Amino acid sequence: DAGVIQSPRHEVTEMGQEVTLRCKPISGHDYLFWYRQTMMRGLELLIYFNNNVPIDDSGMPEDRFSAKMPNASFSTLKIQPSEPRDSAVYFCASSRDTNQPQHFGDGTRLSIL
Amino acid sequence: GNSVTQMEGPVTLSEEAFLTINCTYTATGYPSLFWYVQYPGEGLQLLLKATKADDKGSNKGFEATYRKETTSFHLEKGSVQVSDSAVYFCALSEYNFNKFYFGSGTKLNVKP
C-alpha cells in the first residue's frame, strides 16, 4: 500500500518567495492533517480536514499560511511570503477517522534563507 | 484542557537495558492513546495503541498499558537495542471532540 506522499522532500528558497507543499493522503482516509516540527516548538498541528473540509485551523500561525484540499487525494500548504522563521519540517498525515492512528508522510524539510 | 505530558529526554541507555518513558494525559472524555516513533529523517510511525482503560498495546517488544486511574500510558521495553534509538511521542485522540494531542517527544539513545 502506498503511504502518505509528500513533495518536495527538501525545499530551499529565499525570504519573500511563495512556497507550496503538497500531500497525497492514503486512499480511503477521510482526515488529513498538516504539522510543523521544529527543535524549539516540537510537533505542532497547523490544520486538519475532514472530507476535504477544513475543521480546525487554529494552529495556522498567521495569514501568510493557507491550506487547501480541492479533492480527496490532494492537499496543499502554501506560505506567502515566506520568512526565515518558517524553516522547519512540515508533515502531512492522514487517518480513517479520529479514533484511528495517523499515518505520516516523510515530511518536507523547508529552509528559508 | 486536554494535554499530553511525557518525560523530557534525552534518555541514554546501554544495550539490553530496561526502558521506561513516562506519559500522562488529561482528557475530558474517553481518549484513545498512542505511542509513535520517529527515526532520523522520517515521519512518525505508529508503534502501538490502546483504545480503552486497561488495554495493553504492544509491538516489537514495546508495551504500554492504558491506566485510567493514574491517567498514564507509560512505554516500556525489557531489553533495548541500538536500533531502538529514535524519538518517541505519546499522543491522544478524543473521538467525540475531534481533538488530537502529541507530547513533546522523548529522544532515546541506546549505546552498544
Image (cartoon, helix red, strand yellow):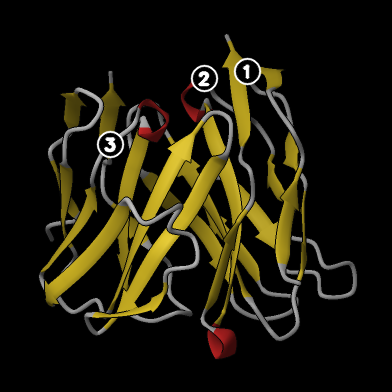
The N terminus of chain A: image quadrant: bottom left
Q: Which residue is mark 3?
A: A82
Disc 3, SS: loop
Tell me the mark number nearer the camera, choosing from 2 and 3. Answer: 3
Amino acid type at image mark 3 = Ser
The answer to whether B80 is drawn above or below residue A19 in the figure is: above
Q: Measuring 36% from the left and 26% from the top, which residue is drawn there?
A: A84
**In the rendered image, which residue does mark 1 sit on?**
B15
Going 34% across and 31% down the picture, which residue do you hit?
A83
**Viewer-proximal residue among A30 and A36:** A36
- The part of the image, by quadrant, that contains residue A16 is top left
Q: Residue at x 71, y 63 (%)?
A: B3
Amino acid type indicated by mark 2: Val
Left or right? Give the position of A33 relative to A105.
Answer: right
For label 2, the residue is B82
Q: In terms of secondary structure, where does tag 1 sit? A: loop
Q: Amino acid at mark 1?
A: Glu
Proximity of marks 2 and 1: CB atoms separated by less than 8 Å: yes
Q: Is residue B24 left or right of residue A110?
A: right
